[in-house]
Image (cartoon, grey):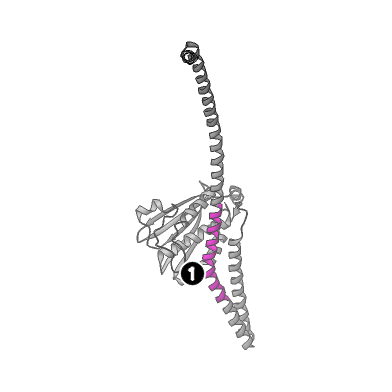
Amino acid sequence: MLRRYGQSCRHSPLAIRIDSMTQNKKDVSGSALAAGLECKEPAASASRIAELENLVVQLQKQLSQTQRLATIGELTSTTTHEFNNLLMTIMNYAKLGMRHKDEPTRDKAFSKIVDASNRAAKVTQTILGLARNRSGVQEPTALEPVIRDTLVLLERELHRYRIMVETEFDAVPMALVEANQIQRVLINLLTNARQAIGESGSIKLRLSYEAKQQHVVLMIRDSGKGIAKENLPKIFEPFFSTKIGPDASGKGGTGLGLSACREIIEEHRGKIRVESSVGKGTAFYIRLPAVVANIERASA
């Protein structure tokens, strides 16, 4: 009887109403919990995104540092050979001066020793400047000395492949740059030019000024094999390369060089552009912001 009463109570309107209220309460609680989770999820997602963005920044810095050290490592073999040649020059002329007591021969020997020593010091200073981990501050910089220092580092390698370098430097204002970074770009583009030429050719560097845009413009043109038209839009993409691997000197083939060049130039609020014809050669144009105050003083 009690069982039948209980069953009848469960089916009564009052019981049904209580069940309905209980179910609604559960639904409300479930909705509140879901809403709470939804509120928490965007905050957690935002935090995770911030962590990932910070990680990307750190990895980019590490990659830049690795690329800089790789550039120095590639230059080490070239400059070591050159430094050895300079030491041999100093030793040979020192022996010549010791053997010959006459003043003209000794003067010539001393002059050659001083020239070789200055050259060795210049190579060492340039390598140390490139290796030095600077603060990354962009400052007014004369680009011509930066270009000439870079040519000092690559002179022996270019001479070995019988590549003639022509320079044409106009009087230009300073550019707002970090010299070490621009030197990395130059080393990369000149090495690419040398590889595109193979043996026996020419590279021309021209420095000019575009007054209307207030840009210092550097052109690097080579007489190499050129770049196929279909590859031109892709050459600045990471890991894209038309080379099968490093050359005999151990340089190139990673597909990161031109990508890094574009990144560096864009960090300087500049632009890099390429023109190329298969069988005729390639030209890179780098535009960097000029120091306006320097221009006004020069024209005054």
Write down the residue under mark 1. Answer: 157
Q: Position of residue 300 (x, y in %)?
A: 61, 49
Check if residue 68 falls in the magenta segment.
yes
Which is nearer the eye, 281 or 7? Answer: 7
In the picture, measured across the screen, residue 113 lies left or right of residue 191, that is: right
- Taking the spot 57% from the left edge, 75% from the top edge, the residue there is 86
Magenta stretch mostly in which secondary structure? Answer: helix
| Magenta part of the chain | 61-86
Residue 81, visible in the rendered structure: yes
- Crowd band around label 1 with a 10 angstrom C-alpha radius: few (<14), some (14–19), many (20+): many
Q: Is residue 87 above or below residue 280?
A: below
Picture coordinates of residue 30, whole percent (x, y): 52, 26
Quadrant of residue 65 in the image?
bottom right
User: As displayed, is residue 100 above or below residue 270?
Assistant: below
Left or right: where 47 falls relative to 157: right
Question: Is 275 or 217 nearer to us in this picture?
Answer: 275
| Residue 1 horizontal/vertical position (percent) | 48, 13
* Residue 241, image quadrant: bottom left
On whether residue 198 falls in the magenta region, the answer is no
Most foreground residue, 49 or 132? 49
Q: Could you tell me which residue is drawn at 63 percent across and 79 percent down?
A: 110
The amino acid marked with disc number 1 is Glu
Residue 243 on image: x %, y %: 40, 61
